[in-house]
Image (cartoon, grey):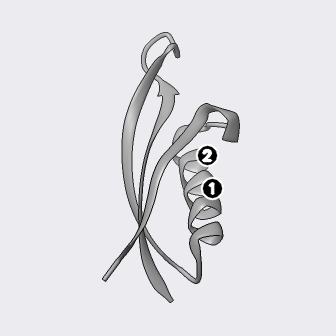
Amino acid sequence: MSKFEIKGRYKGGIVGKTWLPFHKVVDVQNEKNARDAVYSLMGSEHGLKRDLIKIDEVKTVE
């Protein structure tokens, strides 16, 4: 398992028109699984669909 640091934005705010930044670290096997894990986490935490989440950067953390 590797740790991946994911940075991006999600559409939220009071009116839902503002892109807010997020930062997550997940422990998964590869970059694809890291992206899927973030979509899942952000969806469950904020009730967001995938099209409201933009991933800007994925990098391995040691």
Query: Label 1 to label 2, Cα distance in Å?
Result: 5 Å
Relative to 46, is 34 above or below?
Answer: below
- Which numbered tag is attached to residue 43? 2
Residue that appears at 39% across and 58% down: 24
Query: Given the current orientation, which residue lies at the most extreme bottom position?
Result: 1
The residue sitting at 62% across, 37% down in the picture is 48
Q: Quadrant of residue 40?
A: bottom right
Q: How many marks?
A: 2
How busy is the neighbourhood of tag 1: few (under 14 within 10 Å), some, or many (20 plus)? some
Left or right relative to 22: residue 55: right
Which image quarter: residue 18?
Answer: top left
Q: Nearer the viewer, residue 43 or 7?
A: 7
Q: Amino acid at mark 1?
A: Ser
- Residue 56 picture location, percent across and down: 47, 45
- Mark 1 lies on a secondary structure that is helix
Residue drawn at (59%, 60%) of the image = 35
Label 2 SS: helix
Which residue, given by chain and number where applicable, does mark 1 sit on?
A: 40
Q: Is residue 3 left or right of residue 46?
A: left
Residue 38 x %, y %: 55, 57
In the rendered image, the residue lying farthest to the left is 62
Left or right: 48, with 4 as reference point: right
Packing grade of label 2 (10 A; few <14, some 14-19, many >=20) is some
- In the rendered view of the protein, which quadrant contains the C terminus? bottom left
Q: 60 or 29, which is in the foreground?
A: 60
Residue 17 in the image: state x and y as whole percent.
51, 13
Q: Amino acid at mark 2?
A: Gly
Residue 13 is marked as: none
Q: Residue at x 59, y 63 (%)?
A: 37
Residue 12 image offset from top left, x and y in percent: 48, 24
Q: Are marks 1 and 2 in contact (CB under 8 Å)?
A: yes
